[in-house]
């Protein structure tokens, strides 16, 4: 299943495309689409729409994940993200692609296990989960890949679109035990912690 993750913005829009086969996730493409500051807002939105149309037609994703506006101290930033989100949702609807929406903290928890993780931590874990040899850049692309990972991980057979937390448990009860994705995240977090301890000169924690 091909999943497209989008980190929305009018000046820079991050995108990340992954393939999920069973519990295995593989990166296909990622990057950031920039619009010129010389363009008007309507022109920027048109450029974003054209780019998304070409990207969707090239890769044919079955799911699209996009960041939900949860809160923002900067009103202008929130408006810019909202404009871009509208174009993303429009492009998904035009191509009959199901959409999943997540707050930044939900994505961080899914990728790093920590809702207040910073961008470098998210990028490192994205690289580990997807088996990339280098940390994905720029930050917009790394964030988009993280959204795609969240989307792929949250998708379960029989789950209803955008179901609430209580509905999710009724529609698709969570299986007991640790699945391969959760095990990979746990092991990656353990390895990163050990590397940081060794770098700081502290004795590494025993492997359990």
Image: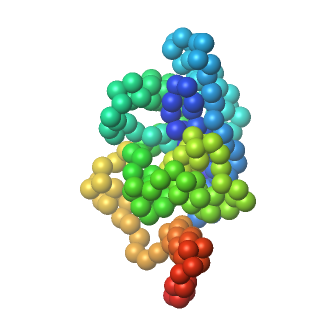
Q: Position of residue 112 (x, y in %)?
A: 48, 61
Q: Is residue 82 visible?
A: no
77 above or below 161? above
Q: Which of the two residues, 69 or 3, is positioned nearer the viewer here? A: 69
Which percent across, then down, holds residue 164? 30, 49
Look at 49% across and 26% down and name the residue there.
84
Q: Quadrant of residue 57?
A: top right
Where residue 145 appears, as percent x and y from the top left, is 58, 48
Horizontal side of residue 151 vs 27, given as left or right = left
Q: Residue at x 65, y 45 (%)?
A: 137
Tell me the residue at 39%/45% (across/down).
Answer: 103
- Tell me what residue is drawn at x 40 percent, y 75 percent: 176
51 w.r.t. 169: above or below: above
Residue sitting farthest toward the front: 201
Residue 101 vs residue 128, the one in the foreground:
128
- Figure label count: 0
Relative to 93, 37 lies left or right:
right
Q: Is residue 206 above or below residue 3?
A: below
Q: Is residue 78 visible?
A: yes
Residue in the foreground of this view, choosing between 117 and 89: 117
């Amino acid at each position: 299943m091909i999943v497209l993750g989008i980190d929305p913005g009018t000046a820079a829009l991050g995108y990340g495309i992954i393939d999920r086969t069973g519990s295995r996730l593989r990166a296909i493409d990622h990057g950031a689409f920039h619009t010129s500051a010389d363009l008007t807002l309507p022109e920027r939105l048109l450029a974003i729409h054209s780019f998304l149309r070409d990207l969707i037609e090239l890769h044919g994703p079955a799911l699209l994940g996009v960041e939900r506006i949860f809160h923002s101290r900067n009103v202008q930033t929130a408006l810019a993200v909202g404009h871009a989100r509208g174009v993303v949702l429009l492009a998904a609807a035009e191509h009959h692609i199901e959409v999943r929406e997540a707050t930044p903290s939900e994505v961080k928890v899914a990728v790093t296990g920590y809702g207040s993780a910073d961008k470098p931590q998210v990028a490192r874990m994205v690289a580990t989960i997807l088996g990339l040899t280098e940390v994905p850049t720029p930050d917009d692309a790394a964030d988009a890949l993280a959204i795609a990972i969240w989307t792929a991980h949250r998708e379960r057979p029989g789950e209803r679109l955008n179901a609430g937390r209580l509905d999710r448990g009724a529609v698709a009860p969570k299986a007991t035990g640790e699945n391969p994705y959760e095990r990979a995240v746990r092991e990656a977090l353990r390895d990163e912690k050990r590397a940081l301890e060794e770098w700081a000169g502290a004795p590494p924690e025993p492997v359990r």
